[in-house]
């Protein structure tokens, strides 16, 4: 087992001990339903069952996702009414040190390239008619990671035709203006609700705002075609109201591999009280199930995200040079891709049950 995997196992060992013996690796939300009964509901047992399902589905591949969603305290993503400019926008000296976010770019598949950082990911999808950039990282890191990183493969920023943003948080949309201004008019694709969020927070997104005049708003399943490549865009609201996830084909030495890109994994919504937390969790769960169904139907064998915490992207890029004729570390297999979404659904259900317990006064 890889050293990094052993480290991840150690990080969640204490948490896993809480959930006991394994159960079948399928979502348990059906058994742990939310319908009220006359008898007192044993919420603790239902929460434990959901966590057990997530633990089994996680195996060794999805421990980061399991730990973040099931066992670490959730971050309350209540919508902010403040509209303030990040300090590093006006004063670059206040940006985090490069050592905290830098990672080398890497070719992952014949047509897919990693141009992200040590925490937040960005990807270039090469087509016969130009490049599609998926996510753009922070404003302060975009030039180094994306514009400079792509040159390693002989790419020119002017070859970028589309910049597709998974959701409008600064760690994914922050670099969009830097990148777009370096292109020859690349169009930005983003969920409709997240376009609105940017428009309503001009100070928050100062220096991080895409061109609205050429922007493409997505509110339903859409196929973005460029040359010989089709990027399936699937709205998956939850992490943000406009979160988008993707399906596309990558090639590994000519062999096609279907890729599922999860656009928002953490519970980035208000979740500290039943109202609106219960509704938010249901939205998130329904979106995860929608993406899971689409991934299974497509036969996805690769799961990637916009955070290495969830897909181990940076670790895997470092393993690529030594693969030789062995398997690509990014190819999870169809069962593992499906299990990723089982982890997500069961952990969300466990958290939702916690709010149901709170609402019941237990």
Image: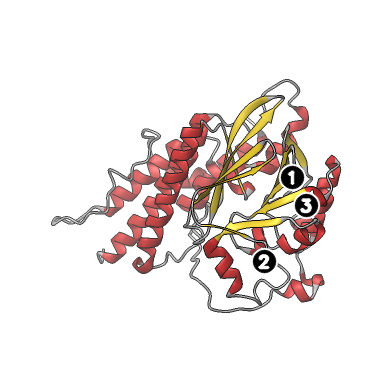
The answer, for residue 117, to whether it is visible in the render is: no
Residue 84, image x and y in percent?
A: 64, 78
Q: CA distance from mark 3 to mark 1?
A: 12 Å
* Element class at badge 2: loop
The mark total stands at 3
Instruction: Name the residue carrying label 2.
Output: 213
Q: CA distance from mark 2 to mark 3?
A: 24 Å
Tags 1 and 2 touching, CB below 8 Å: no
* Element class at badge 1: strand
| Depth check, front residue: 333 or 133 | 133
* Element class at badge 3: helix
Instruction: Name the residue carrying label 3.
Output: 146
Instruction: Name the residue carrying label 1.
Output: 131
Quarter of the figure that contains the C terminus: bottom left
From this viewpoint, which residue is outermost toward the left? 38
Answer few, some or many: residues within 10 Å of disc 1's Cα (few below 14, many 20 plus, some between 14 and 19): many
Q: Is residue 54 left or right of residue 138?
A: left
């Amino acid at each position: 087992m890889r050293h990094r995997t052993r480290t991840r196992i150690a990080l969640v060992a204490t948490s896993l001990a809480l959930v006991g013996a394994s159960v079948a690796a399928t979502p348990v939300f059906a058994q742990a339903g939310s319908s009220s009964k006359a008898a007192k509901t044993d919420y603790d047992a239902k929460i434990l069952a959901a966590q057990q399902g997530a633990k089994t589905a996680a195996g060794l591949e999805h421990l980061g996702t399991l730990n973040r969603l099931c066992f670490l305290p959730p971050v309350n993503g209540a919508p902010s009414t403040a509209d303030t400019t990040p300090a590093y926008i006006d004063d670059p000296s206040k940006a985090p040190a490069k050592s905290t976010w830098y990672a080398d770019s890497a070719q992952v598949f014949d047509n897919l390239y990693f141009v992200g950082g040590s925490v937040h990911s960005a990807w270039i999808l090469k087509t016969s008619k130009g490049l599609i950039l998926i996510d753009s990282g922070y404003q302060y890191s975009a030039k180094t990671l994306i514009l400079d990183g792509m040159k390693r493969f002989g790419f020119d920023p002017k070859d970028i035709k589309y910049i597709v943003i998974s959701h409008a948080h600064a760690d994914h949309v922050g670099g969009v203006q830097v990148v777009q201004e370096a292109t020859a008019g690349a169009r930005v694709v983003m969920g409709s609700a997240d376009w609105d969020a940017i428009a309503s927070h001009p100070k928050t997104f100062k220096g991080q705002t895409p061109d609205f005049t050429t922007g493409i708003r997505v509110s339903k399943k859409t196929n973005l075609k460029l040359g010989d490549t089709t990027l399936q865009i699937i709205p998956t609201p939850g992490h943000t109201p406009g979160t988008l996830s993707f399906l596309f084909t990558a090639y590994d030495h000519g062999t096609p591999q279907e890729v599922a890109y999860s656009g928002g994994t953490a519970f980035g919504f208000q979740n500290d009280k039943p109202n609106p937390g219960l509704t938010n969790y249901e939205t998130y769960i329904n979106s995860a199930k929608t993406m899971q169904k689409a991934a299974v139907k497509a036969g996805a064998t690769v799961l990637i995200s916009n955070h290495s915490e969830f897909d181990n992207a940076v670790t895997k890029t470092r393993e690529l040079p030594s693969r030789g004729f062995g398997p690509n570390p990014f190819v999870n297999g169809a069962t593992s891709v499906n299990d990723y979404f089982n982890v997500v659904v069961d952990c969300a259900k466990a958290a939702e049950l916690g709010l149901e317990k709170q609402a019941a006064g237990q």
